[in-house]
Image (tube, helix red, strand yellow):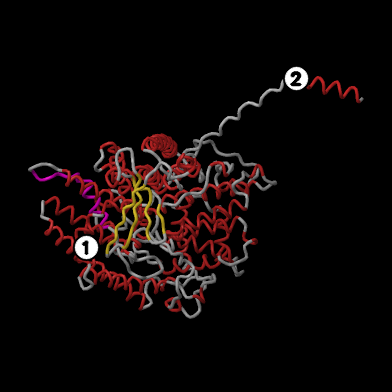
């Protein structure tokens, strides 16, 4: 044996030793991922005004120049918050000329404009205080409205939000709902919370004045309080996920912490991952067909909520396609889910899940858009923007083709609400890609395509929220219920969040385009503006006033648009700077004079126990009557330091009630 070992050693010694091949260098990561600022020089523009406070606009040097003309706004810092590129505040640089025009006149604390702003903010704080529920009534109580009203609110929800985002199993929900009215057995608390959130969302579309706002706010507070109970493990179930999703939509509908929904959506995502919803049920222990399909539906809706809130808030989605393998929902009608032998309908056949399935096909691209705009170190080039734009348009055309195939069939078809909401969303994703280049495009011809996309999409989004058929009827439309029969228009008027903020941004971008056209005009004859753009801005101003009449307490969006439209009119007439200044100041003062009586009426209504107090005469009105709800505690459940679509712009931050400056 020893001799054999020696022979082997001798043979090994005669074998030439090969050098190990040189190790290939690792794949080079993009410099922006290794160090986001390594090759991207940023130019921060700081603006501070009496009405706006201090804002830091972080511009990136572009291929076409540096600074305001060629720099691309990548984010905005305000107080303790940083807003990514998809947040509409990145357009703040487009309004820096207005404060420089009238800043000196607003420095005086006794000016009519400043006094008017303070008066309106004081009333707004009082109204919010009156609307908040008493702490002792925060636990869920059976204070349902009469059955006919509750039926109407449920129908509002089912034909709108549920038609796009699948959350509930409708037959099960209706069975449990009917049992509440027909049985003496106390209802399940979790279902009562779920039901009240459905009612709260439906209330935002019940009428054009949001007459049930006070009840809807209370229902949302009850749900948030119930979810905050520390019984975490016992609530890791499908019903709690449904309640959490409904709460996101209800907060937007009622304007309760709607600006911080992105934070809550992230928490919900992690809860769902903890429960394994990011793994397709086929890879998990055996579950019923019903549970497997509901998990797919809920995961899909959670993904939709995540990218939607990311787009609105300017926050990164913090998710990638490699984080899940859950398949999209199957094309089943709700009634089929209780039959384990059910087979999905053909793709061309419309079911209650078809809209969600069609929209899901575009999810990878929409996720890519939010990551491209809002991820840390996002410094996408214009060429990359155009590439994603082309891919998004292709996906949009395919989506339209799919949905149009359903509408041309003789069977069930998608609701008008669903079609318009999807159209609105896809246009918003396209527009968000180009808004960072909109400011530079006003002076740099290389970005002209972005200018066209932003203006055209803004006009199209406005026409979706406020169709021509409603505008043609004017004030009579509301009287005759024309607007009332349009669920999306009602939601945009009475609700908060996505549709409201995007519609407001669309009007401001159109206003900037009009102002720029006037400043670019080189002609001896009066300039001619596109009538449809002018009409859109004026209509948006009237729309903002309708929102205040429906219970919105923040008047500053209306004030801003009044000043901007006045400036456009002055430029059209060729007025001198001093005359323009005088008219802008008058516009600000007049807007406050219009809004102040509306806010006063809201305060009086709350003081007299008005609002929707008379509606709580259905199941289990709270002991002591609704007057108990008038005395409220601080908004501890929702005091997240958030800022809504417009209020922070004027220093009127949600839940804090302290007035502050406005950046225009």
Q: CA distance from mark 1 to mark 2?
A: 87 Å
Question: Do the residues bearing badges 1 and 2 touch, measured as CB atoms within 8 Å?
Answer: no
For the question of whether residue 604 can be seen, the reply is: yes
Location of the N terminus (image quadrant): top right
SS majority, magenta: helix
Q: Residue at x 32, y 43 (%)?
A: 437
Q: Which x, y percent locates residue 298?
A: 55, 50
Looking at the rendered structure, the secondary structure element under dot 2 is: loop
* Of 24 and 56, the residue lying toward us: 24
Left or right: residue 462 compared with residue 615:
left
Q: Image point 36% across, 78% down: which residue?
A: 607
Q: Position of residue 656 (x, y in %)?
A: 40, 69
Q: Which residue is mark 1?
A: 103
Q: Is residue 515 left or right of residue 659?
A: left
The residue wearing badge 2 is: 15
Q: Indicate whether 142 appears above or below 345.
A: below
Q: Secondary structure at mark 1?
A: helix
Left or right of residue 417: residue 289: right
Residue 409 visible in the current orientation: no
Q: Residues within 10 Å of mark 2 (few under 14, many from 20)?
A: few
- Chain part drawn in magenta: 525-542
Q: Would you identify the image quadrant in which residue 283 lies?
A: top right
Quarter of the rendering occupied by the C terminus: bottom left
Q: Which mark is residue 231?
A: none
Please tell me whether residue 620 is drawn above or below residue 293 in the rendered image: below
Residue 567 picture location, percent across and down: 18, 55
């Amino acid at each position: 044996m020893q001799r054999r070992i020696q022979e082997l050693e001798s043979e090994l010694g005669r074998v030439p030793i090969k050098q190990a091949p040189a190790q290939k260098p690792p794949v080079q990561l993009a410099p922006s991922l290794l160090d986001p600022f390594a090759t991207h020089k940023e130019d921060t523009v700081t603006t501070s005004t009496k009405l706006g406070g201090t804002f830091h606009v972080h511009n990136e040097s572009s291929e076409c120049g540096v600074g305001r003309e060629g720099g691309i706004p990548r984010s905005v810092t305000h107080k303790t918050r940083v807003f990514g590129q998809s947040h509409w505040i990145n357009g703040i640089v487009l309004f820096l000329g207005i404060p420089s025009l009238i800043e000196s006149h607003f420095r005086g604390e006794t000016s009519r404009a400043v006094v008017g702003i303070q008066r309106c903010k004081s009333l707004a704080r009082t109204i919010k205080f009156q609307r908040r529920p008493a702490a002792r009534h925060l636990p869920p109580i059976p204070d349902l409205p009469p059955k006919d009203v509750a039926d109407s609110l449920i129908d509002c929800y089912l034909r709108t939000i549920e038609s796009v985002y699948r959350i509930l199993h409708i037959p099960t929900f209706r069975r449990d709902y009917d049992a509440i009215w027909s049985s003496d057995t106390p209802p399940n608390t979790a279902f009562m919370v779920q039901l009240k959130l459905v009612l709260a969302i439906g209330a935002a579309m019940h009428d054009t004045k949001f007459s049930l706002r006070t009840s809807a706010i209370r229902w949302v507070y009850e749900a948030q309080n119930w979810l905050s109970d520390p019984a975490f493990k016992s609530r890791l179930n499908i019903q709690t996920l449904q309640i959490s999703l409904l709460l996101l939509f209800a907060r937007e509908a009622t304007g309760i912490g709607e600006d911080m929904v992105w934070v809550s959506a992230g928490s919900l995502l992690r809860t769902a991952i903890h429960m394994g919803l990011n793994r397709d049920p086929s890879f998990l222990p055996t579950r019923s067909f019903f549970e497997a399909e509901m998990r797919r539906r809920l995961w899909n809706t959670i993904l939709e909520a995540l990218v939607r809130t990311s787009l609105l808030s300017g926050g990164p989605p913090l998710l990638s396609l490699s984080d899940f393998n859950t398949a999209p929902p199957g094309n089943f009608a709700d009634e089929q889910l209780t039959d384990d032998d059910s087979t999905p309908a053909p793709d061309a056949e419309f079911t209650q899940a078809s809209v969600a399935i069609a929209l899901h096909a575009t999810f990878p691209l929409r996720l890519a858009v939010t990551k491209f705009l809002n991820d840390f170190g996002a410094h996408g080039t214009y060429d990359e923007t155009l590439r994603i734009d082309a891919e998004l348009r292709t996906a949009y055309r395919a989506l339209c083709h799919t949905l149009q195939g359903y509408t041309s069939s003789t069977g069930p078809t998608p609701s008008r609400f669903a079609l318009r909401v999807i159209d609105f969303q896809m246009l918003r994703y396209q527009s968000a890609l180009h808004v960072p280049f909109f400011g530079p495009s006003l002076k740099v011809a290389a970005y002209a395509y972005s200018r066209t996309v932003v203006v055209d999409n803004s006009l199209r989004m406005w026409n979706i929220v406020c169709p021509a058929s409603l505008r043609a009827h004017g004030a009579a439309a509301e009287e005759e219920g024309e607007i009332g029969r349009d669920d999306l228009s009602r939601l945009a008027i009475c609700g908060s969040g996505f549709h409201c903020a995007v519609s407001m941004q669309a009007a401001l971008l159109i206003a900037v385009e009009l102002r720029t056209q006037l400043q670019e005009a080189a002609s001896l004859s009066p300039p001619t503006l596109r009538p449809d753009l002018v009409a859109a801005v004026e209509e948006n101003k009237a729309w903002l006033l309708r929102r205040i009449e429906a219970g919105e307490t923040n008047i500053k969006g209306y004030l801003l648009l009044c000043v901007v439209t006045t400036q456009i009119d002055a430029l059209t007439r060729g007025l001198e700077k001093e005359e323009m200044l005088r008219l802008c100041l008058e516009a600000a003062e007049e807007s406050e004079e219009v809004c102040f009586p509306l806010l006063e009426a809201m305060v009086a209504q709350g003081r007299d126990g008005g609002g929707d107090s008379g509606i709580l005469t259905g199941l289990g009105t709270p002991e002591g009557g609704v007057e108990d709800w008038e005395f409220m505690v601080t908004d501890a459940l929702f005091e997240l330091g958030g800022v809504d679509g417009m209020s922070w712009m004027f220093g009127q931050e949600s839940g804090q009630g302290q007035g502050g400056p406005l950046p225009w």
